Amino acid sequence: MERIRSQLFYKKALEVIPGGVNSPVRACKAVKADPVFFERGEGAYLIDVDGNRYIDYVCSWGPLILGHAHPEVIAGVYFASKRGTSFGAPTWQEVELAELIKNAVPSIEKIRLVNSGTEATMSAIRLARAYTNRKKIIKFEGCYHGHVDALLVKAGSGLATFGIPASPGVPEELTAHTLNLPFNDFEKVKEVFEKFGEEIAAVIVEPVPANMGVIPPKEGFLKFLREITQQYGSLLIFDEVITGFRLGVGGAQEAYGVIPDLTCLGKIIGGGLPVGAYGGKAEIMNLVAPEGPVYQAGTLSGNPIAVAAGLATLKELLKPGTYERLNLMAELLEKGIREALEDLDLNYRLHRVGSMLTLFFTEKEVIDFETALSCDTHLFAEFWQRMLEKGVYLPPSQFEAWFVSLAHKEKEIEKTVEAVYKVLKKLRK
Ligand code: PLP
């Protein structure tokens, strides 16, 4: 496969954009490759600027659950844009989207639309701190909640590593109230609550983390978080930016039967356009301006084109049988990869939750960030490159989820499994 035009564009991009990309992971550095520049998407496929076709498991990092350029989404965007691109004033479609989400997501009584997942988590934390009149936040190592200053903290050993900023430009004062704990670790959470319980405003968690690869919560872990936060008067925030409308219309909270106080959404609810949201109990949401004193605003929040794409996507998802079809394809993919691993006598870990999946290049059990780090990332890099040559575009990092969309059918799954088998066989030597 030649990618001459991609290389040319990348060279030009490096001159005008830091690292040549508008979001770091797109640079493909973790897989020791140059980024592929894309021309268009069609269903389960991406077509690059050199005309190569790939089966896409990035799906824009999750939003494209219907696949690329779904006709309903395109129609929604087209007709909305003809009416105007932005009003900076309310529209009835925003209300429709809010109602639709409220009816689907158990924890949400009121919701505010923003422009990204980062804005959603940032605003939810501000609100949680205002509601509880406390400062500390618990997050989990390996969970990503966007590039909010207070949440950009490094993992560290010990009981509770007080936020050491993971990025220059984030003053220690801004992460000083962030406690970073291992995911799935009941004991550490308990210890920290015993020590700081009265000061903890909220626990924020990806209920099924997908940003260190897909790691299911241990049996009872989410329920435990619900109970301990209630016991200490702290809020529980589910960051469902990835899992919202991915694990079913009610997200992870419905799938696991644990209802948080606040929920952050993004990705799928914008159908590939920039939308985020945070919502929860009315009593808490009523603190948000202008109803209450907690300031949060946005020039383009509830943008009519983005809302149209979100509405079209969610309406498709609400049709009967959607998630059964989606999960069936993901199950087929899982089964095919498991068979390939078995045939080749490889013991790599494969995790799937709904339509999200990660093949960890390690034989060790993966339950949190530290254990995920046991993966052979060099081997993954080679795997990724060879899969690309076989026409399969995977997330360019070991620590990401592969997303199956409704546009992936048996044909694409079979082709992917065949490629996985051949590549793993080659790598095994
Ligand atoms: N929360 C989670 C779980 C995410 O995966 C992401 C982004 O990948 C975010 C928040 C931030 O969303 P955005 O990139 O839209 O700011």
Image: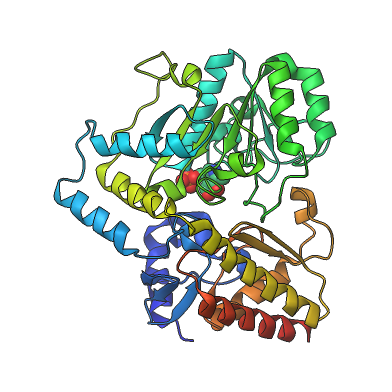
Is 294 situated above or below 123? above
**Where's residue 138, x and y in %?**
68, 30
425, 325: nearer the viewer? 325
Examine the rendering and report whether any part of residue 146 can be seen: no
State the residue at coordinates (43%, 53%). Answer: 317
| Left or right, 419 with reference to 378 | left
Point out the image quarter for the C terminus.
bottom right
| Left or right, 392 with reference to 83 | right
Q: Which residue of the protein is positioned furthest toward the front in this rendering?
A: 320
| Left or right, 405 with reference to 37 | right
State the residue at coordinates (77%, 41%). Answer: 184
Q: Which residue of the protein is positioned furthest toward the left in this rendering?
A: 83
**Where's residue 327, x and y in %?**
58, 61
**Where's residue 319, x and y in %?**
42, 54
State the residue at coordinates (53%, 52%). Answer: 246
Name the quadrant containing residue 115. Answer: top left
> Looking at the image, what colour scheme do you see?
rainbow
Is 69 situated above or below 269? below
Name the quadrant containing residue 175. Answer: top right
**Where's residue 78, x and y in %?**
21, 56
Count of numbered circles in the view: 0
Examine the rendering and report whether any part of residue 373 can be seen: yes
Is 32 situated above or below 262? below
